[in-house]
Amino acid sequence: MPVGAYDPWIQNHCTPEQAVAMADAAGARFFVPIHHQSFKLSREPVHEPLERTQAALAAEPERLVLAAVGQTAVVYPARAAAH
C-alpha cells in the first residue's frame, strides 16, 4: 500500500492511516508499505510515512512486513480451519 508522497499530493496519494484503513477494508492479512524512504519524493519528512504506518498498526505490528528498504520476509499461507 502506498504510504508516502501525500504532501502536497493528498488528492492523488493516501496518508499512512488511510492506507491501513484500505488494507483493513480489503481484508489484507499483511501490510507492505511502498512509496517511502527510497528517495525524497514529497515534502513530508522522509521517515514520517513509516512512523505513521507503524503507529496505525500498533495493535497488530506483526501485519507490517517489508518496512525497511531491502528487507526480506517469508510469508506462510494461512492454516485452514479445522472441521
Image (cartoon, rainbow, N blue to C red):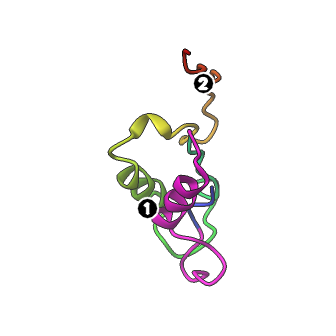
The residue carrying mark 2 is: 78
Residue 42 found in image quarter:
bottom right
* Residue in front for this viewpoint, 77 or 1: 77
Would you say 62 lies left or right of 76 here?
left
Residue 48: mark: 1
Question: Residue at left 33%, top 44%?
Answer: 59
Examine the rendered structure and indicate whether residue 59 appears above or below residue 38: above
Asked whether residue 39 is drawn in magenta, I would say no
- Say few, some or many: other residues with alpha carbon within 10 Å of mark 1 (under 14 / 14 to 19 / 20 or more): some
Question: Residue at left 35%, top 53%?
Answer: 55
Outermost front residue: 83
- Residue 28 spot, x, y in % from top left: 59, 45
- Residue 68 spot, x, y in % from top left: 55, 40
* Residue in front for this viewpoint, 27 or 41: 27
Magenta stretch bounds: 5-29
Numbered label tally: 2
Q: Amino acid at mark 2?
A: Ala
Would you say 78 lies left or right of 45 here?
right
Quarter of the picture containing the N terminus is bottom right
Residue 31 found in image quarter:
top right
